[in-house]
Image (cartoon, helix red, strand yellow):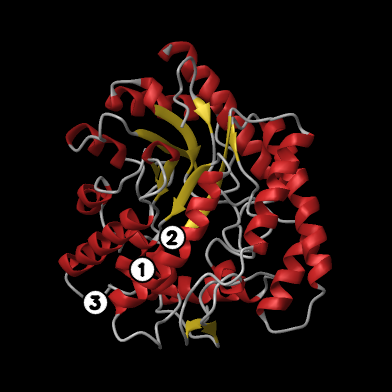
């Protein structure tokens, strides 16, 4: 994993806006309508090639495939693994439930979207195992081809894969005798993706919103200690599934849910950071741009990263159409670098993805690219002071 040796490098958290027709097909398939799978594949291939070029033009140094060939950051596993079917209604978000007027407005907005919601995911009804690697191989091949077309446009490419914890939390267990047995089975299946992505030479980003978000979903009515026990179990299981992937090739992304809401039920970073630091990864990806967690970077002075770990700091909010001023981005980077004590360990990033499930993004596509360009310019400004 590249350090910011001479300047602050830039990246993002994975998902980027999908074309409208691709989103429409993902939405139709999620609702059980028949779709032309070949058309889906063709559009996904075309979107991947375009998204690589757009990232490079915006000044992204560490880019990916934008998750164009997936309908959501974890929902896609149902097409690559056995055992999933039907659907169920996820627990309501604790913070949204506290504000009935906001909840009604949010529902009205959601009802008007052509989008794939991750709040009615499938359930585990049978044995979970990775049954078909063809979609994974095609996704990797498509990304490689897109990189080749644009003559290696990134300092470093990455690809994402979900935490076993988010799959097990969102995709309800109705097959395994215990939740731990379910977690172990999902982790073993995901090992296939982790090792395949790393084997292609890409940085592996693990998307782990479960390690923060599930506090105000599944674990909203229990003492925080029970949630921390869940976090610890996930990280222990995750470490086992990463045993064949070099630590320095993995970054772990944690967030409190990529939705606009009060977030006043979020677990503090301080409560989970000691557990996160037990993950066998080379970098943490944490959100520091949004109004609820912008102050928590200071915690890293008191509870520091391991000496060999990097920080991908969210300095761009993925839920507002405000385009951050480059000076604001630069100021955020300077403050975080001061806490880290070494600017080479800092990479500029976004708080989360811009379209974590197809069509669910709140930021207009043209604004997304303006925000990423502002991040690149802010990184350039900060670099002139830090290096």
Please say if 121 is above or below 228: below
Mark found first going from the N terminus, 3 or 1: 1
Residue 103, image x, y percentages:
47, 74
Residue 359, above or below 141: below
User: Residue 152 occupies which quadrant of the picture?
Assistant: top right
Q: Which quadrant of the figure has residue 263?
A: bottom left
Seen at 37% across and 40% down, the residue is 247
In the image, residue 63 sits, relative to residue 274, either above or below, namely above
Q: Nearer the viewer, mark 2 or mark 1?
A: 2
Residue 57 in percent (x, y) is at 72, 31
* CA gap, disc 2 and disc 3: 18 Å
Q: Which residue is mark 2?
A: 257
Residue at 52 percent across and 24 percent down: it is: 379
Query: What residue sits right under mark 1 in the picture?
Result: 95
Mark 3 secondary-structure assignment: loop
Q: Nearer the viewer, residue 146 or 201?
A: 201
Across and down, in percent, residue 151 comes to 74, 29
Horizontal relation, residue 208 to residue 105: left or right: left
Residue labelled with disc 3? 221
Residue 244 in view here: yes
> Which label lies toward us, 3 or 1?
3
Q: Give the quadrant of the C terminus.
A: top left
Q: In the image, residue 329 lies at what x, y percent?
A: 49, 30
């Amino acid at each position: 994993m590249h350090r910011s040796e001479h300047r602050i490098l830039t990246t993002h958290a994975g998902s980027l806006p999908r074309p409208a027709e691709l989103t429409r097909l993902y939405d139709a398939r999620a609702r059980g309508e028949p779709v032309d799978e070949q058309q889906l594949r063709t559009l996904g291939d075309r979107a991947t090639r375009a998204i690589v070029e757009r990232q490079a033009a915006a000044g992204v140094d560490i880019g990916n495939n934008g998750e164009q060939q997936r309908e959501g950051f974890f929902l896609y596993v149902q097409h690559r693994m056995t055992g999933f079917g039907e659907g169920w209604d996820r627990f309501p978000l604790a913070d949204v439930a506290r504000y009935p007027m906001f909840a009604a407005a949010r529902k009205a907005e959601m009802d008007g979207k052509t989008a794939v919601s991750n709040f009615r995911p499938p359930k585990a009804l049978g044995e979970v195992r990775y049954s078909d690697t063809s979609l994974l191989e095609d996704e990797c091949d498509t990304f490689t081809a897109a990189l080749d077309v644009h003559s290696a446009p990134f300092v470093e490419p990455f690809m994402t894969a979900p935490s076993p914890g988010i799959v097990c939390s969102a995709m309800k267990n109705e097959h395994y005798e215990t939740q731990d047995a379910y977690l172990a089975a999902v982790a073993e299946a995901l090992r296939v993706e982790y090792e395949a992505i790393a084997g292609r030479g890409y940085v592996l980003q693990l998307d782990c919103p479960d390690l923060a978000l599930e506090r105000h979903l599944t674990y909203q009515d229990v003492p925080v200690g029970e949630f921390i026990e869940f976090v610890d179990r996930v990280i222990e299981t995750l470490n086992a599934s990463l045993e064949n992937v070099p630590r320095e090739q993995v970054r772990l992304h944690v967030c409190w849910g990529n939705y606009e809401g009060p977030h006043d039920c979020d677990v503090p970073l301080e409560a989970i950071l000691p557990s996160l630091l037990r993950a066998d990864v080379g970098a943490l990806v944490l959100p520091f741009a949004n109004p609820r967690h912008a102050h928590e970077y200071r915690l890293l002075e008191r509870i520091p990263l391991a000496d060999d770990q990097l920080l991908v700091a969210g300095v761009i909010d993925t839920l507002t159409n405000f385009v951050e001023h480059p000076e604001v981005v630069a100021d955020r980077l300077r403050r975080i670098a001061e806490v880290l004590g070494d600017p080479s360990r800092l990479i500029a990033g976004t708080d989360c993805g811009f379209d974590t499930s197809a069509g669910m993004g709140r930021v207009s596509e043209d604004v997304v690219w303006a925000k990423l360009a502002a991040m690149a310019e802010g990184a350039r400004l900060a670099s002139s002071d830090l290096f």
